[in-house]
Amino acid sequence: MGRARRPRGPARLLHGRPYGRLALVDPVALAPWGSPFFRLVGAHSTVFEQLPVHLHRALVREYVSSASSPGLHPAVLDRLVDPWLDEAGQPAFYRQIAQADQRFTDELEDHLGAIGIPVLVCWGEDDAWIPVGKGHELATRIPSARLRVLPGAGHLVQEDTPAELTAALLDFLA
């Protein structure tokens, strides 16, 4: 029986998990992160949980919509926001933002240079949530990474430019 390969990606850094390639699609990976809205909600989630239903619905729809550059198809937008609109979803939406903690990405930042497997970083050129500059920075910090910027895509790259993302991933993983 052959010797097990030593994992060389982020999962190895934290959990010793092996794999041969890593594709990152517009990840939350480098500090500081979180838009001003995200930080406001995180600091005051219990206040936002009490919004009247019609205001909450409008806020969530607008927030999720802002993740797409060309705009989401109405059916896609509905599928993305519906889980957050019922009685359990409203507090859960704000709670998950409040629970987001930058320390979980901070613990990886100093180890990015140790990733020794091929890495593809895909980023939406028009990402309003995490600017494309973060994609450039992330690709620079991982020696084996290459960056693929997808024109016309926002943060939801898989929704905005699905064919281009699929082609980039297939090419990288082949």
Image (tube, rainbow, N blue to C red):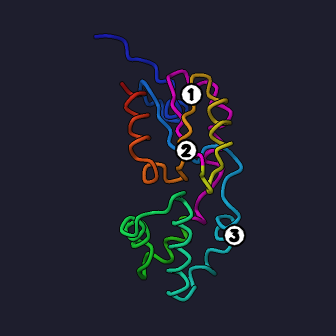
Q: Quadrant of the N terminus?
A: top left
The label shown at residue 151 is: 2
The quarter of the displayed image where residue 145 is located? top right
The quarter of the displayed image where residue 66 is located? bottom right
Precedes in sequence: disc 1 or disc 3 = 3
Q: Identity of the amino acid at label 1?
A: Arg
Q: Nearer the viewer, mark 1 or mark 2?
A: 2
Q: Nearer the viewer, residue 53 or 115?
A: 53
Q: Identity of the amino acid at label 2?
A: Pro
Q: Which residues are magenta?
A: 97-125
Instruction: Return the residue at label 3.
Output: 40
Q: Identity of the amino acid at label 3?
A: Leu
Determine whether the residue tagged by mark 1 lies in a helix, strand or loop.
Answer: strand
Q: Position of residue 98 (x, y in %)?
A: 60, 66
Q: Dot 1, how many residues are within 10 Å of its Cα: few (below 14), some (14-19), or many (20+)?
A: some
Q: Which residue is painted at 50% across and 42% down in the image? A: 25
Instruction: Return the residue at label 1.
Output: 146
